Image: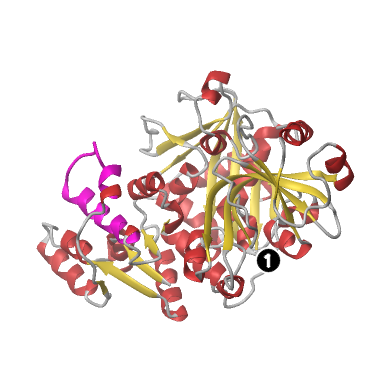
Amino acid sequence: MKFLLDTNIIIPIEPVAIDGFEANTEVIASLIKSFQDGGHQYYVHRASINELKQDLNVKRRDARIKLLGKYPVLKISMDIESSVSAAYEGTETNSHNTIDQILLSALVFESVDYLVTDDLGIHKKAAKLGFSSRVATSEDTLAVIQALFPEVTREIPPLNSILAYELDEKDPIFQSFRTDYPMFDSWLAKCKREHRQAWTINLENKQLQGICIVKIEEFCDYNIVLPTLKICSFKVSEEGRGFRYGELFLKGIFDYADRNNLQSIYVETFEKQTALISLFLNFGFQILERCSQKGELILSKTLVFSSEFVQSMEPLEFNIRFGPRLVKTDGVGVFVIPIIPKYHRMLFPEFEEQLELFPGKYSFGNGIRKAYLCHANVRAIKPGDLIIFYRSQDVQGITSYGVVEELNISCIPDKIARAVGKRTVYTFDEIQAMCSSDVLAISFRLSSVLENPVGIRDLISNGVVTAAPQSIVSVRQEGSQWIKQRLAI
């Protein structure tokens, strides 16, 4: 596959001074190694070289340009595609924005499969252009390669729900906290005394791969709806990057907030944590105008809304903002998708343990954002529609549902892979094998996995389906109303 690297990816991996190492340097180093080991092509754009030439620090500029010389240059025009230009209409005209537009145009011109950037502004514009599936952070890109081209199958540890006093403060994962927060140890001791809710992801040797601590607050310094859930810590180790642990933590957080009837969730984080901020923004968090006393950004997600507010939002927009469990059902299509146990286990590993959040060995099974591939001759599905998964053979019932984000149809493996690479459980070889004919790739957000499946007899008697589905079925109005009520959505 072909990847275009933004300068914010190159600079951390090519520091010109000892203080040039950044929060994502180690992740990017792993990413470049994955490119090389897998034989993937990666480039810089001429526009990026021009950007570095504008650095007023002559020594740093000359050193970076020399280091950049070892990267292949994408030989494409510096033109800006018209739709990209339109997306930037009304924004400030400057050289940085111009370069961003040139990089995005490379995607529109089909020069590369992915643009790799940790610039949140580019990600927002890509979403506006409908290219969010092909613009990835350094961490997401590493996950794409590990999923599509796995070298070995890695067993994914479970998400453990614990209380803070069970944590070992000597674990290496806490060292970076001590760097950013000098009073960290006294704060962690306080968390332990208060028995705060926490989740961990551990390897067999008990070393933490990830840690998340939360706190319910009845009062807050910020303009946030109360009571709220504060995400006090949210950390994935360098070794755990690329396995969707962040989304696995979010599953636990959203479920906890729902069970405790909380009105909002918020987190404070430094601006340098671009991958973390991108993750939160992708799940409906909004950046508040003010910062914390430590200079951190404040991101919040409101979980309550007025009926007028709901009506003003598109179904997909509503699900991102207030979901994943909450979905907007008015005016959306409902489709039943049959899935055999083998792929069901990969796509919905949590069903195997009835919501105990014990994932399987496929990292993208951890995610809330998923993709389903099939050969169904259905073209009516659109973003915001409700898709309901029917597990055939053994369960013979509906087990889960989600909201459609995007539909892609192609028999070209590269096109399908880049459309679903950020969320798929299929390897590139499996995608290639499927592409003997047109593949329907449905990108969606998982809303819920049911504790008690809805069986085929109930589905037939209430007009959802007329028989056990063999392919994707569009549900008629009567059946749609019943299934929405049955699922309490």
Task: Residue type at mark 1: give it.
Answer: Lys
Height in image: 92 above or below 169? above
Height in image: 224 above or below 90? above
Q: Which residue is mark 1?
A: 361
Where, by quadrant of the figure, is residue 363 drawn?
Answer: bottom right
Q: Position of residue 339 (x, y in %)?
A: 74, 58
Asked if residue 93 is among those painted magenta in the image, a careful observer would answer: yes
Inspect this view and state whether residue 170 appears: no
Q: Position of residue 79 (x, y in %)?
A: 20, 58
Inspect this view and state whether residue 80 appears: yes
Kindly identify the residue that appears in the image at 74 percent across and 31 percent down: 481
- Which of the two residues, 332 or 232, is positioned nearer the viewer here? 332
Q: In screen coordinates, is 204 left or right of 311? A: right
Q: In screen coordinates, is 74 left or right of 305? A: left
Q: Position of residue 279 (x, y in %)?
A: 49, 48
Height in image: 303 above or below 346? above
Kindly identify the residue that appears in the image at 45 percent across and 74 percent down: 34
Q: In screen coordinates, is 405 left or right of 17? A: right
Quadrant in the picture for the C terminus: top right
Crowdedness near tag 1: few (<14), some (14–19) or many (≥20) residues, C-alpha within 10 Å: some
The stretch of residues the image draws in magenta is 84-107
Asked if residue 78 is among those painted magenta in the image, a careful observer would answer: no
Quadrant in the picture for the N terminus: bottom left
Q: Position of residue 233 (x, y in %)?
A: 54, 45
